[in-house]
Structures are given as structure tokens and as C-alpha cells.
Amino acid sequence: MTSLNSELIIDSDVIRHNISYIKGKIKNKSNFMAVIKSDAYGHLLEKLVPDIDDIVDGYGVVRIGEAKKIRKFSDKKVLLMQGVYSHLDLKRSIDLNLDLVVHNNDQFELVAKNKNFNNLWMKVNTGMNRLGFEIDEFMNIYNEYLCNSEFVLMSHLAASNDKSASSNKSQFKLFRSLSNKMNRKVKKSIANTGCVMNFPNQTYDWVRCGIGMYGGYLNDKNILTSMTLRSKIINLRKIKPGERVGYDGRALAKKNMLIASVYIGYADGLPVMIKDKTKVMINDQIASVFGRVSMDIVTLDVTDIKSCKVGDWCEFFSKKLPISNIVSANDLISYYFMTGVKSRVKKLYKTNH
């Protein structure tokens, strides 16, 4: 048994920086909803909410349990972004004064039976084709129940990170056409992080930002990675040309090399498929993965790292080594790393403000 741990360090000051930067891009006087589902994308919801409550206007989650935790610290708007699916959950959401997304007829029937038309976000499908009413279906509900009501009309972009994607233009057109048919009390929301960054004039009344807050938006270097995933070197080994490293001998030495074994593996959330040459950082110098990730260990090529020794920290992503590096090198997404870190990794929450 060892007390040695991999660590995930969460820097709330970086998150505050990212929020302020994103808000500075918004052209309209939009409210800012911080999306903090999945334990704030792994950033410890109960610690984060008190730290950002002064700079956001509301919170987005998908679980009532998370909404209940938020209510310990904030009385601001909390949105259940996938709504509720039972009378019991509807009652609980009313008791907690939550806003609800309604995205299909089953959910609307729950609302209608309880005659509870307050705090609704009516979600329409403009092209994502996951959740949301079809336009005609929604208009039937609107004309019968909501034509004089206040609610939020919402939709979700399928390709907001790609400014050139044709789907953005068609989704905006559909949403704009529909919103023009609404009464004046209806608010609107379609913008996520990518929309704010690429289409700042389409932000309407509410923006719903998640990944950008945490530094996982890859197209702007001013948005910083708020997590540091790191672990220590536990062994150094010299190998010769022709020798192989790790399971299946995937990595073959073509020269004399120095190989570091680092105390982190797929049981900690480091994906087993990470490729050789993926960059990591040791002593502010760049090393690279060399060999297949195992359950508890990953091996690295540290041949060119000066003064490398057992006990040195290896960072897989951090403010200095953006998460975009490991994501882009392995055809993955930043959400995967942020929410995939396992329980045996020690989480440390850092704040200076």
C-alpha cells in the first residue's frame, strides 16, 4: 500500500478568468448561465458555486441532486436542462424553485396536468435531432397553452465550434423565424460557448456556457485550462535500440533512451488508447508518451529532459500545457478528460481571490 497519489488540481481563478473573457465577447445584454452538470465537469460543484456566484446569472444541471446542492449556496436561477420525467420530480423541482426544460409531449403533459406553466424553457429541434419539439408540434402547444405566457424559447447548436458549418446558418434561420412568432414576453436562448465565440450576435437573452468556462474550448488560446492532471515519476530505466516498452511492445526504441514510469494509468482515467508522442510536461520541459498505458502506469520518453529524476511531477494537461494538446493528439474531446478522472485521483481545489 502506498500513500502516493495522482492529483487533479482545480484552479477557480482560471475559471473566473474564462467566464469574464467569454462574457466580454457577448454583443447583447445576455444573461450568463454557468453549465455545471456532471459535478461542474469534474470541477467540484459545491466548491465552485460559491466562487463564481457573483459573476454568473444562473446555473444549468441535469440532475435534481445537483440542483439541490446549488440551493445551499445560491438563490439564482437553476435550470434542469433535460427537465423532469415524473410527478415526484416535478414536485421536487417546484419546491426548489427550479426552471425546467420541456422537450417532448410526455414532459409537457406533466406540466399541463399540474397547471404549472412557470419557469419553463421550451426546447425546439432546429437541427441537432436529439431532444426538442419539432416546430409544428411546438406551435400547436404554444397556440393552445402558451401564447400569452412568459417562458424561454431554446434550441441547441450541433456544430457551433465550426464557424463554417452550414448547419449553423440553417439553425439560426429556423430559430429566428420561430422566435418572431412569439409574444413579447418570451425570452430566447440558443448560444453555447462555441456560439458566443463564433457568433456573438446570436446570444439573445441567455447564453449557456459549459466547456469554455473550464478551458476545454480549443479554438481560442485566451481560454485557459483550469485543471492540472499530474502524477510522479516512480522509476527511470535506460534502454537500447531494438528494445520495446510496455504491453504488446508497441513502442520500439531506435536509439539509446531514458524511459520514465509515471504512477497513473487507465484506472485513474487516463485513456488506454493514448498514442505515442503525446506531449506531457516535466520540469517545464516537453516529454512524450512512449508505450501503451496500463492500469496504474504510463511510460514516457524523457531522454531529452534535463535533471529528470524519480519524484518529479509529470503534467498531462495544465494551464501551461493546455488540454487541447492531449485532446487533439488523440482524437478525443476535452469533456472526456474532465469528467473521466477516477475517484482514486486526489482532487485539490485552489483559489486565490
Image: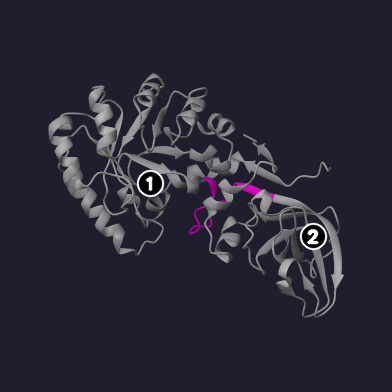
- Kindly indicate the quadrant of the structure image that contains residue 187: top left
Crowding around mark 1 (Cα neighbors within 10 Å: few <14, some 14 to 19, many 20+) is many
- Kindly indicate the quadrant of the structure image that contains residue 1: top right
- Which three-letter amino acid code belongs to the residue tagged 2? Ser
**Which residue does the image show at 59% across and 32% down from the upper left?**
47
Circle nearer the N terminus (1, 2): 1
The colour scheme is one colour
Q: Is 225 covered by the magenta stretch? A: yes
Q: Which mark is residue 274?
A: none
Q: Which residue is mark 1?
A: 26
Relative horizontal placement of residue 70, taking residue 277 as reference (left or right): left
Q: Position of residue 332 (x, y in %)?
A: 53, 60
Q: Is 294 covered by the magenta stretch? A: no
Q: Position of residue 220 (x, y in %)?
A: 49, 57
What segment is highlighted magenta in the picture?
214-229
Q: Which residue is mark 2?
A: 261
**Which residue does the image show at 48% across and 23% down from the upper left?**
71
- Depth check: 97 or 87 in front? 87
Contact between marks 1 and 2 (CB within 8 A): the answer is no
- Depth check: 131 or 229 in front? 131
